Amino acid sequence: MKALQYLEIGAPPRVVTVPDPEPGPGQVVIKVTAAGACHSDEFIMSLSAEQYIYGLPLTLGHEGAGTVAALGEGVEHLRIGESVAVYGPWGCGHCHNCTEGKENYCTNAAALGIAPPGLGSPGAMAEYMLIDSPRHLVPLGDLDPVKSVSLTDAGLTPYHAIKRSLPKLGAGSTAVVIGAGGLGHVGIQIIRAMTGANIIALDVSEEKLALAREVGAHHAILSNAAAAGTIRDLTHGLGADAIFDFVGAQATVDLAGVIAAVEAEISIVGIAGGALGVGIQTTAWDVAVRAPYWGSRSELIEVLDLARAGSIGVEIETFSLDEAPRAYELLHQGKIRGRAVVVPD
């Protein structure tokens, strides 16, 4: 089968031919119908040889959807041809967090060498994909896999962050979304669907600010030196009640600290390396700072339910598997408006 693999540190990924996967006991093989490209992929491919821990060659793609193609011995409750989405943050399945469906916070994964697909295990950028356990598959039903595949990360990750802050986002509150790209434009829709908050979106791209307005932001402003003052003006000097930083650079994290209201919550979701200190006189009183990661299996089901109800959707650009390296080039250049989706067929 064809697969998009990262083969050499510092080199672009290439489409290669690899053996078709075969399911062992308790495993499932899906025929991939769609796979999402993400800045996380770009991040790991930017790491030096000393920093890189994901193994080579690595089949990319931690956002995946497909149809069940083969079942290993002992697998029940799945049928051949069923349309499914892949729950990406794989865990041990036995620790306290995993038994609650929070495999994103598995306490044993690192020690056991368990890695998510595309982030250490073979990912979805291939014609077929091996799934280690049927619990990592969620029914898609009648949802279009191409339009929905990015929800497994670009929907689940903001949903998990926003859900934690829902008590802060009643009527008349203010939510700030920093970065209106792949995750941010979905985050705006989630906030709009689930809260009464006024939404202020920030980005350095006018095109992405236009997208933010299209998907429900009440205000969309350039992320520059004037942004903090504008937000203070829009909130009558109070600041924002919840800030979701989908960039995570030092400049955006610092901005989040400046615009946070008393008792606000800041979620640093982006992986650009920024950090925010917490202490007396560093932020407004009683500001909480979080660094959430992905989401739980039950939250993925909730995200797909929101999509099924028409409350959220993903702006996508599609590419064939042979075109997948080009998708990452455009992602690196900031030219993908929402999410890039690879369709193997």
Image (spheres, helix red, strand yellow):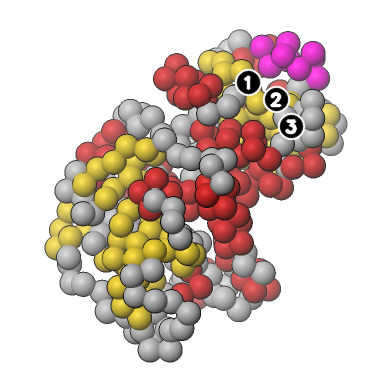
Q: Quadrant of residue 281?
A: top right
For badge 1, the amino acid type reads His
Side of 32 where 240 appears, left or right? right
Magenta region: which residues?
A: 230-238
Residue 335, percent across and down? 33, 28
In the displayed structure, 152 sits above or below 135; it is: above
Q: CA distance from mark 1 to mark 2?
A: 6 Å
Quadrant of the snapshot with the N terminus = bottom left
In the displayed structure, 82 sits above or below 265; it is: below
Residue 105, percent across and down? 61, 62
Q: Which residue is mark 1?
A: 218
> Which of the two labelled residues, at mark 1 and mark 3, occupies the earlier sequence position?
3
In the displayed structure, 157 sits above or below 133; it is: above
Quadrant of the snapshot with the C terminus = bottom left
Q: Nearer the viewer, residue 19 or 64?
A: 64
Q: CA distance from mark 2 to mark 3?
A: 7 Å
Q: Residues within 10 Å of mark 3 (few under 14, many from 20)?
A: some
Q: Are marks 1 and 3 in contact (CB under 8 Å)?
A: no
Residue 82, percent across and down? 38, 68
Q: Which residue is mark 2?
A: 198
> Which of the two labelled residues, at mark 1 and mark 2, occupies the earlier sequence position?
2
Q: Which residue is mark 3?
A: 196
Q: Are marks 1 and 2 in contact (CB under 8 Å)?
A: yes
For badge 2, the amino acid type reads Asn
In the displayed structure, 255 sits above or below 143; it is: above
